[in-house]
Image: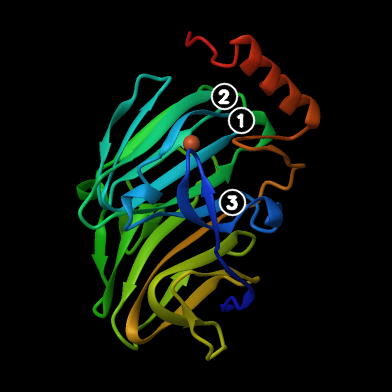
Amino acid sequence: MAIREAVLTLRGKETYDGAGVRLLRVFGHAEAGRFDPFLLLDAFGSDDPALYLPGFPMHPHRGIETVTYLLEGSVRHGDSLGSGGLIGPGDLQWMSAGSGIIHEEMPQESPRGVHGLQLWVNLPGKEKMRQPAYRGASAAEVPVVPTGSGSVRVLAGEWGGARGPVVGVARSPSYLDVSLDPGAAITLDAPYGRTAFFYVLEGAASTGSSPDARGAGDCVLLGHGDEVRLVAGPLGARLVIAHAPPIGEPIAWGGPIVMNTRAELDQAFRELDEGTFIRRRS
Ligand code: FE2
């Protein structure tokens, strides 16, 4: 057994995306490749409606999966597959853009604001042009495993005998929402060869052999090993942790479209101009 140590700690950078939604970009283009197969993590939202109501109007994606985990408030969504509806706290959306999808994500006015996470998972070249797919899971479908000194919500992958509701996605990631009581410790499997990171939502936690606590808004990329050890601070901790095998292919990144080559990006934007971006379903 080898405990993974922290190799990089990032703080989200405040930015605005979509039509003017405040968010913290935790990692993204600037770190391209370091979190492979994860491309981007945004902590979006605000308590101020002016900073979330503009939303993310219709925009395309190709070559990636976008994973939205809503923590607070509600978001109305709709896409070119005909999927649509309202998601609420604890709900999960796993959208495999594949060859192309056009969608919108519009936060609704909510008493406690709108807060959530959006994670992008890259697709390997041979799956970038596969048929798009939308999968939604309500909070009630996400298993919650008590640990004795906290709980683990299993968003994807398996933990403690429970299996997350989203299966059949490209990189078979593990994605867990971990809550720890003050001072509580937990050890999680994160097998060799997989890229692993965690992002602190509330409180603070230390990891590996370091006594230094990471607080809310910190993202930690973990080094080699097969286990992650987390110890909550005096106020407890809530964090998400994800791991998946890297893809190891070139990344050609054009905003919401991520391919392997510049030529593939050019083709995608040409198809958007020509109105041929969305493939007909056979
Ligand atoms: Fe999107």
Give the alpha-carbon distance from disc 1 to disc 2, as whole Å: 5 Å
Give the image quarter of residue 27.
Answer: bottom right
Give the labeled residue for mark 1: 127
Q: Tags 3 and 2 in contact by the CB under 8 Å rule?
A: no
Q: Which badge, 3 or 1, comes first in the chain's sequence?
A: 3
The amino acid marked with disc number 2 is: Arg
- What kind of element bears circle 3? strand
Q: Residue at x 38, y 53 (%)?
A: 116
Give the alpha-carbon distance from disc 3 to disc 1, as whole Å: 15 Å
The amino acid marked with disc number 1 is: Glu
Front residue of 137 and 191: 137
Give the labeled residue for mark 2: 130
Q: Residue at x 41, y 39 (%)?
A: 94
* Disc assigned to residue 74: none
List x then y, in percent, for residue 28.
62, 52
Q: Tags 1 and 2 in contact by the CB under 8 Å rule?
A: yes
- What kind of element bears circle 2? loop
Give the labeled residue for mark 3: 38
